[in-house]
């Protein structure tokens, strides 16, 4: 796995130190700008104009077992809302000039009400209708897992070929925080009690049920959880496996990624388990309210840019952080160097 360019990182850090600003005054904005420059291989970095979000949608068998505050039918309804540009992340993306694409990897319906052209694009990479209930059975077969990983990689290649300078992964799937938390538990060797959060806002009884489901899933997976690809098959889903492939391919291609909430970060952790070093290409857009997300970010060595108590998903927290990335790049590009100031001018 290649890493962001160390020579460029050093040159960017030198430029940062030479700006006409007090030493350290830009704080983490300066660090972020240096990371972007290293990823691009250029000092100063180019403006990050082309940002692309891909929302990977899928249903999860555990949603039928009391782990979510909403019924599974909401997944398909929200996919239609994305297509209509009316979801929460749609508003943020419009405000910040982020292109949005939604794909059905495992939604438990066929979208027969959509026109043929829209349906064909939406379902071009579909793996199956719904993923297995992970406390009772594997989420995916080995063949489906490989197909989903490759589907995500193919999508990343398409977005990069179209000009993406920064990628974001989004999610949609009722019940998806359950497999995502299980993936983090497997990756970090933690029990369900430490990783299970309230997802869509479930109460105490549902939280206990969700914790029991994750415990049972981890016990069923057993030693297979030590292998990241086996983890995806046993504990993940079609959409989460595709997201993992998407993040892996971005890292392989040397394109930076702004991570979102639990699903995105669980897949980033899994990607880094598959190919150590992938996380060097990832930055954390925001801190969600899910405990597993914070634990995975700590393991990856990533500090979120925003902390707004968001738990919407969809890629929304990362999209909200895009202006922070652009601000960091603008500072490193456009602020005068101290050496350029006329003698006697204040810094």
Image (cartoon, rainbow, N blue to C red):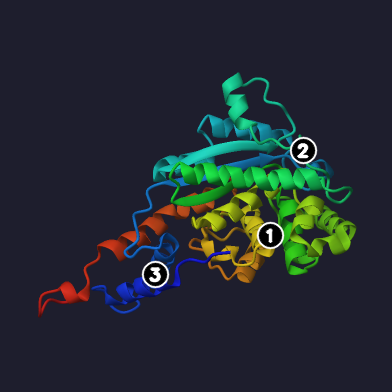
Q: On the rendered structure, is 285 left or right of 289?
A: left
Image point 89% across, 48% down: which residue?
136
Residue 8: mark in rendering:
3
Q: Position of residue 179 (x, y in %)?
A: 75, 52
Quadrant in which the N terminus is drawn: bottom right
Q: Position of residue 317 (x, y in %)?
A: 52, 52
Tell me, for residue 256, which label it has, or none.
none
Position of residue 125 in the picture relative to residue 145 (left or right)? left
Label 3 environment density (alpha carbons within 10 Å; few <14, some 14–19, many ≥20): many
Give the residue number, with chain letter if any, for mark 1: 270
Residue 209 against residue 346 in the figure, above or below: above
Crowding near pointer 1: few (<14 within 10 Å), some, many (20+)?
many
Q: Quadrant of residue 98?
A: top left
Mark 3 touches mark 2? (CB < 8 Å)? no
Question: Which image quarter: residue 295?
Answer: bottom right
Residue 225 x/y as whole percent: 81, 61
Choose between 191 and 326: the one closer to the eye.
326
Report the residue at 85% width, 55% height from top: 217
Can the viewer see residue 110 in this picture?
yes
């Amino acid at each position: 796995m290649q890493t962001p360019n160390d020579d460029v990182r050093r040159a960017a850090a030198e430029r940062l130190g030479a700006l006409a600003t007090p030493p350290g005054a830009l704080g983490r904005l300066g660090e972020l700008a240096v990371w972007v420059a290293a990823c691009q291989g250029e000092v100063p970095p180019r403006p990050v104009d082309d940002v692309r979000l891909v929302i990977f949608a899928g249903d999860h068998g555990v949603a039928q077992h009391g782990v979510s505050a909403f019924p599974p039918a909401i997944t398909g309804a929200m996919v239609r809302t994305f297509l209509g540009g009316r979801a929460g992340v749609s508003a943020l993306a419009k405000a910040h000039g982020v292109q949005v694409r939604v794909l059905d990897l495992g939604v438990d319906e066929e979208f027969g009400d959509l026109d043929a052209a829209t349906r064909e694009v939406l379902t071009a990479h579909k793996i199956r209708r719904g993923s297995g209930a992970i406390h009772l059975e594997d989420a995916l077969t080995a063949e489906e897992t490989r197909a989903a990983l490759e589907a995500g990689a193919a999508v990343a290649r398409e977005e990069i070929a179209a000009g993406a300078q920064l990628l974001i992964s989004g999610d949609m799937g009722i019940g998806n925080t359950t497999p995502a938390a299980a993936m983090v538990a497997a990756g970090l060797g933690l029990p369900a009690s430490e990783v299970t959060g309230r997802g869509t806002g479930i109460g105490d009884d549902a939280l206990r049920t969700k914790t029991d489901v994750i415990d049972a899933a981890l016990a069923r997976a057993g030693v297979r959880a030590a292998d990241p690809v086996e983890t995806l098959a046993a504990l993940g889903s079609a959409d989460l496996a595709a997201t993992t492939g998407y993040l892996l391919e971005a890292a392989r291609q040397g394109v930076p990624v702004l991570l979102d909430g639990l699903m995105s970060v669980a897949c980033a952790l899994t990607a880094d388990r598959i190919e150590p070093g992938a996380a060097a290409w990832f930055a954390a857009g925001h801190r969600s309210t899910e405990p597993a997300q914070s634990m995975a970010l700590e393991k990856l060595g990533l500090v979120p840019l925003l902390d707004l108590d968001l738990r919407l998903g969809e890629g929304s927290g990362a999209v909200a952080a895009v202006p922070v990335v652009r601000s960091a790049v603008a500072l490193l590009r456009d602020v005068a160097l101290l050496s350029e100031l006329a003698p006697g001018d204040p810094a």
